[in-house]
Image (spheres, rainbow, N blue to C red):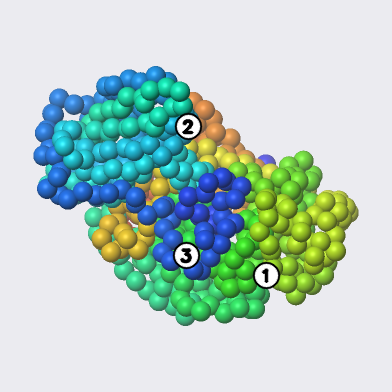
Amino acid sequence: MLVKPKPIWRWLPILLAATLACNTLAPTPAAPTRAAATPTELGPAATAVTALPSPTATALPATATAAPTETPTLAATPTELGQAVAPSVGYQLSPASVHFHPDPQLYSGDIVSIEVVADDAPQNWSGAAVRLYIGERGEEPLARVNFTRYGLGGRLQATFTWVWDTAGRSGPQTVILVVSPGPVAGETTPPEQELTLSVNLLPSEARPQPEPEAQWAEAESACCLFHYLTGTAAARDIDVIRAQADAAFAHVAATLGVTSEQKVGFTLVSRLLGHGGFASSEISLSYLDRNPAVTELFSVFAHEGTHLLDRQIATVRPTMMVEGLAVYVAGGHFKTEPLDARAAAVLALDRYIPLADLANGFYPAQHEIGYLEAGAFINYLVERDGWETFKGMYATFQSAPTDAAMLDAALRAHYGVTLADLEAEWLAYLRAQPADPAQVEDLRLTVALFDTLRRYQQLKDPAAYFLSAWLPDGREARRRNIVGDFVRHPLAPDNIALEAMLDAAGMHLHAGEYAPAADLLAAVNAALDADDLHAAPLAADYLRVVEQLAAAGYEVQALRLDGPTALVSAIRAWPTLETLTLTEAAGGDWQITAGN
Ligand SMILES: [Zn+2]
């Protein structure tokens, strides 16, 4: 099916900007099923809950830092040199386990963080101490931390947050990590493992735009306080952001029947992390132009605002109900959507997740299906017995061994029915809904889009993958004037082209144009399969346009191909968007034939 393209500028202004589908980020979930349910993790009393746990690294006095011994013969990238010097039985730390931030490249002057991942290590690594040395292994390390569970995925890692100030250094640097695994019952204490890496610091002035100009700035609205970086898309659009947030928070307050007791803090991040939103005591929101997780700003703010304001109603509640309430109040997950018809489409696609399973493993469940089911279930409860009955239940959840048990007990108390019986009743109601083929196709492609986005992140931008996203604390960053972690991200032509394809697929979906959305997703997956964009002609075309515009000084933000015509929005002078038209000439060259 050929779909007539819309002019690119109709895609651009507000829709391009934001993102959705937050996770309420728990600092250190012990088990994914209970990640965000406990009051200390989400409750308002939790002061300065950091997106990632506060650094447990003990930064030692500067005088204790071993003087750097340059080793210029070392390889230039962290993965090329690693060697386990003191092998011990079993698990081996490898260079691939070590992630430097901000990524994907370090520059002189960065305040560097390091994650040492040992997710499949044996039990005696849990809690094991890691020491970090720079240059050479002296008497005192630069910092030491212990392995612990991190992030939504509960990954076992040692996290050195902002411990290494590289001011005054450049070129190859030696980084030494020493792990002291814990004792194993019945055996002698295992030997230490030492891993030596080389990491290259590029000159500070080589940092790509807009980072060199980016400084923390603030803007207030009636509801919120926004922290953003100058020179970014958020700075350009801050007035729109303020207005949309106020409208959404007013809607949330009216729906929940509570008012915000204080202004809500947002850190606007100039790179996509996860699906774009993480809520703790403040909210981190990705705001950027080339954004595969695109949706209306209003929905984002309504979703995240619900997470903050619902804490005035309750602090103990199942994660499924926390996220479901945000979907219900926002009127949809990725966009305003008919929740009943959407949930019926879940059944039509045979993707339904039983509610007890979903309640007990909300974040690990298929993301789009889980959020949708949770929102639609709450919609059904409200339609069935009214808002006050629902709110009465929501306000009085009692702690239970599992989230499903917590929900079951609450339903018995307030609705006089078990979770199983209410679920059966709801399913019968959904099955009686008239079939809507467009909703089924829309949902199928929505799931495919986000599955593909997550696959892209795992393979090409791992720090952005939602279960292990690198999201340090905004307040601490502002205090120390650190910006790199909030703006830097992979900018290789492959990354830009694949992100632009996902972004275009999302825009087609929003417009109900299913065939071109499906074509784009198939091309992205083919390119990821082959690790080569030339494996799919459509991806190769995107790459060629991205490369030719890069040669002319542009970073592509949105790109739509229509035969020999490319409609593009791109940035040459941050953060001003320019609209360009390119035409394919003989030999596959694309030439700019119109500008804005
Ligand atoms: Zn959420």
Q: Which residue is mark 3?
A: 46
What's the residue at 41%, 64% (across, down)? 48
The residue labelled by disc 1 is 395
Q: Is residue 569 above or below residue 125?
A: below
Is residue 324 in view from this perspective?
no
**Secondary structure found at label 3:** loop
Residue 39 found in image quarter: bottom right
Work out whether mark 1 precedes mark 2 in sequence or the reverse, and give the earlier one. Answer: 2
Crowding at label 2, few (<14), some or many (≥20) Cα neighbours within 10 Å? few
Q: Mark 1–mark 2 contact, CB under 8 Å?
A: no
- Circle 1: residue type: Ala
- Under circle 2, the secondary element is helix
* Count of numbered circles in the view: 3
Residue 397 visible to an observer of this rendering: yes
Amino acid bearing label 2? Gln
What amino acid does circle 3 point to? Answer: Ala
Which residue shows up at 53% across the image and 77% down it?
Answer: 260
Q: Residue 9 at x, y = what percent?
A: 49, 59
Where residue 204 appears, as percent x and y from the top left, is 18, 48
Image side of residue 251 versus residue 46, left or right:
right
Q: Earlier in the sequence, mark 2 or mark 3?
A: 3
Quadrant where the C terminus sits is: bottom left
Please provide percent x and percent y for residue 578. Answer: 38, 58
Residue identified by numbered label 2: 123
In-front residue for pair 21/18? 21
Q: Vertically, is 220 above or below 558?
A: below
CB under 8 Å between discs 2 and 3: no
Relative to residue 60, is residue 279 drawn left or right?
right
Q: Is mark 2 within 8 Å of ligand 1?
A: no
Which residue is found at the position 34% from the left and 71% from the top? 218
Image-based side of 416 in relation to 41, left or right: right
